[in-house]
Amino acid sequence: MKTVFIAYDQAHQQNVIDALNDTSVRGYTFFEQAGGRGTKGGDPHLGSHAWPSMNSAILTVVEDDRVEPLLQRLQQLDTDNPMLGLRAFVWGCEQTI
């Protein structure tokens, strides 16, 4: 199993949920307000007067065979909307309850 952390501009919300549903990823934890700044450019998302936009984030644990289809969907979403920002990170999950 793998853990996938997805950080994205709030404008991506429904598209990210659709990507999870379309790749049969059912369980996740949603963080509505997440601040940050991307490594490749774009504006910071800090919820401040100067930088008012915000990110959201999702953390999910999925079977290994669902990771690549999910990442492909997310990559396409980021490619189609490069100014919004979307990143996904994958690491191993040793145990769950």
Image: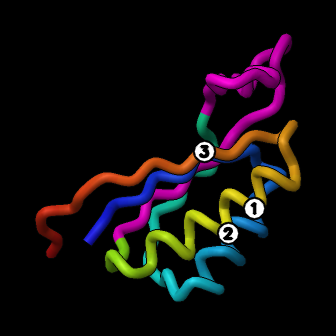
Give the residue drawn at x 87%, y 49%. Answer: 81
Say if 59 sits above or below 37 in the image: below
Q: Main secondary structure of the magenta part?
A: loop
Identify residue type, mark 1.
Gln
Identify residue type, mark 2.
Arg
Q: Secondary structure at mark 2?
A: helix
Which is more N-terminal, label 3 or label 2?
A: 2
Q: Nearer the viewer, residue 84 or 53?
A: 84
Please give the label number shown on residue 87.
3
Q: CA distance from mark 1 to mark 3?
A: 11 Å
Which is more N-terminal, label 3 or label 1?
A: 1
Say if 22 sits above or below 42 in the image: below
Residue under circle 2? 73
Of tags 1 and 3, the one toward the viewer is 1
Give the residue drawn at x 31%, y 65%. Answer: 2
How packed mark 2 is, by other alpha carbons closer than 10 Å (few <14, some 14-19, many 20 or more), is: some
Q: Identify the image quadrant of residue 60.
A: bottom left
From which residue to which does the magenta span run? 35-61
Give the residue drawn at x 62%, y 50%. Answer: 32
Identify residue type, mark 3.
Arg
Inspect the magenta stretch and tell me whether residue 51 lies in it.
yes
- Describe residue 81's horizontal placement relative to residue 14 as left or right: right
- Where residue 89 appears, x then y in whole percent? 45, 48
Say if 86 sits above or below 67 in the image: above
Q: CA distance from mark 2 to mark 1?
A: 5 Å
Circles 2 and 1: CB atoms closer than 8 Å? yes
Give the residue drawn at x 42%, y 58%. Answer: 4
Inspect the magenta stretch and tell me whether residue 48 lies in it.
yes
